[in-house]
Amino acid sequence: MLIRKYPSVLIFLGILAAFTIAVTLMSQAYGTGAIPTSMVKTLGKTLCLALAALAMDLVWGYAGILSLGHMAFFALGGYMIGMWLMYARTGEIVAATLANAPIPPTPMELQQGITSQIFGVVGSSDLPLTWAFAGSLPMQLLLVLAVPGLFALVFGWLAFRSRVNGVYLSILTQAMTLALALWLFQNDSGFRGNNGLSGLQNIPGLGHVPQATLSVWFLWASALALGLAYLLASWLVAGKFGSVIRAIRDDEARVRFLGYSVEGYKLVIFTLTAMICAIAGALYYPQAGIINPAELAPIASIYLAVWVAIGGRGRLYGAVIGAVFVSLLSSWFTGGRAPDLNLGPFSVQWVNWWQVLLGLAFVCVTLFAPRGLSSVIDAITGLRHPNRRGQDLGPDLGALREQEAEA
């Protein structure tokens, strides 16, 4: 039923599978070595960013909630898994060091050694309460979903029950992100302040596995997560739930008049997308190797919205295209691969000018191509805007609302 309504789902999954297999066969671990390990990690991280963009498209492109705080959930997911990675890896190092002592260390001495190694940099020798489950992988995996999900649930309930909408809601989500980042910057927050969590690329118990192999494993995990999330998102928007959230986006007052619980639908989609972002962050930061409060800066969530806008909001594949396109282009420009542009007395160094280029691209897409890069695919498949005989398409100019209503 889902494939019949949305054949693009099968095409997307096929392209994702082919991409993953191709990268694997050209990796240094399982193939020819044509793609270096650093590039495999970049591609894996790009898939994680595409997963976050998919969540952003659900909450913004389909439900009309412009959240400028979803990267906070992305970072929280990274912090939750990073706590276990750092604690367990430090435990291995401390245990190996104390193993040479004449008397075997007690569990208390082992924990004190771990705590000193992790929190000595912020002048603390006590394990914070927030790290109570850091030694348990199952518990931290549960917290990857529970902490961002509960945070989004409480924030969303407070905001939606007060019927905060539009730009005011966007400002609130941005303020939430800024407040969380400022708290994490403090040394007494329990998350090492500005130092953040580092060494996350060293997976406990897998010290004998080279990074080339680990990078491919994380690529597989990222691709699997993106594929499953795409299936879930397609299933949601194909049914009644998708029709209701699109109706809320287009005319919230009328949907409420028809008897639907607008706040309930908003809360579900807001919380669900926060948890999807958290999963993306939990897969991203072990590949990045480090996470700090700067990752929660409000600008990061703005970038996420820009990716979705450039790709084409209201299109699941558009969000993925936008994230992949901008992420890879950003890596090329900021990595020094793009040659400087010499204009005589003035030289453009793309490392410094890349953000200006990204901003101009966002403005151009907003003014001239509201459907973003996905309009190219629409043109290839013959998907056109409905002929409304001059009638306004509604508040979302990028949506083909009549075709969506048929779904």
Image (tube, rainbow, N blue to C red):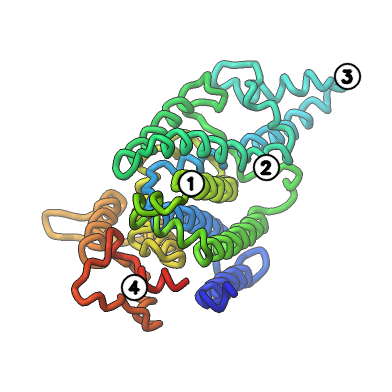
Q: Earlier in the sequence, mark 4 or mark 2?
A: 2
Q: Nearer the viewer, residue 227 or 1?
A: 1
Q: Residue at x 26, y 78 (%)?
A: 387
The residue that disc 2 covers is 141
Is 296 positioned to the left or the right of 228 in the image? left
Find residue 121 and report its horizontal and vertical position in percent: 56, 22
Label 2 with label 3: CB-CB less than 8 Å: no
Q: Is residue 81 visible?
A: yes
| Secondary structure type for disc 1 | helix
Label 2 with label 1: CB-CB less than 8 Å: no
Q: Earlier in the sequence, mark 3 or mark 1?
A: 3
Find residue 94 and report its horizontal and vertical position in percent: 74, 28
Q: Amino acid at mark 3?
A: Ile
Q: CA distance from mark 3 to mark 1?
A: 53 Å
Label 4 with label 3: CB-CB less than 8 Å: no
Q: Nearer the viewer, mark 2 or mark 1?
A: 1
The residue that disc 3 covers is 103
Q: Residue at x 49, y 49 (%)?
A: 265
The residue that disc 4 covers is 375
Q: CA distance from mark 2 to mark 3?
A: 35 Å
| Secondary structure type for disc 4 | helix
Q: Nearer the viewer, mark 4 or mark 3?
A: 4
Q: CA distance from mark 4 to mark 2?
A: 38 Å
Mark 3, Cα crowd under 10 Å, few <14 / some 14-19 / many 20+, is: few
Q: Residue furthest left?
A: 345
Q: Residue at x 46, y 62 (%)?
A: 243
